[in-house]
Image (cartoon, rainbow, N blue to C red):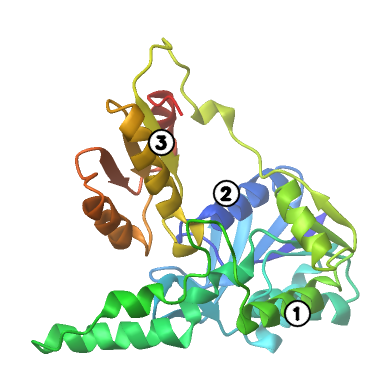
Amino acid sequence: MKIAIFTDSYLPVINGVTFAVDKLAEKLSQHHQVEIYAPACKNSGWVERRGRVIIRRYASVPIPTYKDIQIAFPSFLSVYSSMDKFDPDIIHVHAPGTLGLLGVLLSKVMKKPLVGTYHTLYPETLMYVSPRRILAKYLKAIDRVTTGMGLDIKVLRNGDKQVDCSGVSKETLPQKMTWTLVNRVYKYADAIICPSEAIKRELVKRRVRKGVVAISNGLDVKKFWAKNNYRLRNRIVHVGRLGFEKNVEVVIRAFAIVLKQMPKVGLVIAGDGPAKKDLEALCKSLGLEKKVRFLGMVKRDNLGWVYRDSDV
């Protein structure tokens, strides 16, 4: 079978979506022909080979407030020409971005079956492209080249966070518009895959109901190191991208409560992202600098010991 994968996020950018797409393509390529259509990134070529997978890249620009998010500007004729030569049996779209939309369009033009994967709750990521965050980025740049301005950049940056520590979410107009876009894109899919039952319930709630099935991204168990002993190490671990929408501050505030009853416990946070500085500032304000350790980005091959040496 020939499979064309359209994704608006791919390696070398590191996040859950890029990892899931890469592993899916790797496994599928063992028995099928796979081509990936993805944004170009710094130092990437226009056409690359990763194992048995062909990757075709298209011009893109990063958004100002979070450079790991690339917006691609693919030429329809260029992509159509490549797709016409490849002649896929099926098209698999992984996001409702510009490349995802092009994948949907080509599935109709070329009369190919369409599968859509809904990886994450996209409305929660709107904070990275909001006018307020872009303004904050601009003001911060000005603040670096001037003195004594006293700009409260943090207030502007945090103003777009929609979920507080109480877990109460307030939906904004842009979020409602994003759900409308998601509905209009995914309604053309013959089947929709999501990574969890929780996201499936949310999609059904939002009337994205056509053939939705929950399939876990899966784990390579060989990457996990076996425990030699199970003595308590008094260590809690959080692994993941430190994005504002991930609400890692909830983990830190919960840890502060646990610490009052279990003063020997420590928290390890593995990962990087735009919220890291704010999370470090939160730890300082709560007096947790010596109890919370930020490891930064950890290669997936090295995550085994992080999990092995933790209790929770």
Location of residue 304 (image quadrant): top left
Mark 3, Cα crowd under 10 Å, few <14 / some 14-19 / many 20+, is some
Asked whether, in this view, residue 82 is left or right of residue 241, the answer is right
Asked whether, in this view, residue 239 is left or right of residue 17, the answer is left
Quadrant into which the N terminus falls: bottom right
Q: CA distance from mark 3 to mark 1?
A: 36 Å
Residue bearing the label numbered 1: 180
Q: Judge whether 126 appears above or below 222 on screen.
A: below
Residue bearing the label numbered 2: 51
Residue bearing the label numbered 3: 237
Location of residue 92 (image quadrant): bottom right
Q: Amino acid at mark 3?
A: Val
Q: Amino acid at mark 1?
A: Thr
- Residue 305 location, x and y as percent? 38, 28
Q: Amino acid at mark 2?
A: Gly
Local secondary structure at mark 1? helix
- 228 or 312, which is in the foreground? 312
- Residue 308 location, x and y as percent? 42, 24
- Residue 261 location, x and y as percent? 35, 28
Q: Residue at x 46, y 88 (%)?
A: 131
